[in-house]
Amino acid sequence: MRVVLGIDAGGTSSRAALFTLEGTPAGRGRAGGANPGTLGMDTAAANLTAAVQAALKDIASSQIVGVVAGLAGNPGRCAALAERVFRDLLPRASRVAPVRLVGDIVTAFAAGTPSPSGTVLISGTGAIAARITDHVPVATADGYGWLLGDEG
C-alpha cells in the first residue's frame, strides 16, 4: 500500500494523517505544538516526531510516497525542523518521496475549500490573514508571532 502523509504543525498542537492514494485514511497522530521559534527546536522536533510516529503506527515509512507539511513559524527554522524530523523518521529508501513544506496558511486554506484562490484567517496561538492565489499566498497581514504581532 502506498500512502501520503499530511502534517499540520502549529504553535499549540501538531497533527499527522496518512491516506492511501485512493483517499482512505490509514493513520493519524497528534502531539503538542511544533513551532521551533516559540517552543525551541528540541521540543518542536520531539512533538512533531511523536505525531508522525503515531500516524505511522501500522504503516512502514517506506510506504510513504509524498509528504506535505504545513508549518507555523519562521520558514528557515521550519525547514531545519523538517530536515531533522524526516532525517530520523524516514529510511533512506523513502527519502526519495517528495516533501513539500508550506506555511500553515496554505494548509488551513486547503482544509476549508477546494478552490485554488481565496482568503484565509488563522486565529490560534498566532494570528495571520492571507490572500491565496492558485494555492500560493500572495499577500499576508500579521503572522509575526505573539511577541511582535497578533495585533487583532
Image (spheres, grey):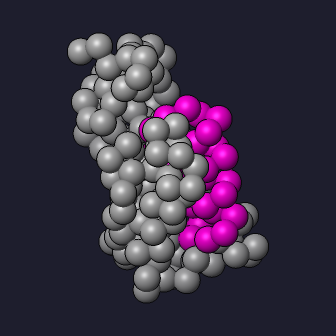
Residue 87 x/y as whole percent: 69, 64
* 23, 109: nearer the viewer: 109
Residue 12 x/y as whole percent: 32, 47
Q: Residue at x 44, y 55 (%)?
A: 7
Taking 109 as reference, is 50 left or right?
right
Magenta stretch contains residue 59: no
Label count reads: 0
Q: Would residue 111 be visible to someone looking at this image?
A: yes
Dividing the picture into quadrants, the one containing residue 28 is bottom left
104 vs 148: above or below: below
Dividing the picture into quadrants, the one containing residue 144 is top left
130 vs 92: above or below: above
Q: Residue at x 50, y 53 (%)?
A: 44
Q: Residue at x 57, y 71 (%)?
A: 64
Q: Would residue 120 be visible to someone looking at this image?
A: no
Q: Residue at x 25, y 30 (%)?
A: 123
* 148, 31: nearer the viewer: 148
Magenta stretch contains residue 66: yes
Dividing the picture into quadrants, the one containing residue 22 is bottom left
Taking 49 as reference, is 118 left or right?
left
Residue found farthest to the right = 92
Residue 103 x/y as whole percent: 48, 35
* 111, 20: nearer the viewer: 111
105 vs 99: above or below: above
Residue found farthest to the bottom = 58
Residue 104 x/y as whole percent: 42, 38
Taking 94 as reference, is 118 left or right?
left
What quarter of the picture does the C terminus occupy?
A: top left
Q: Which residues are magenta?
A: 64-89
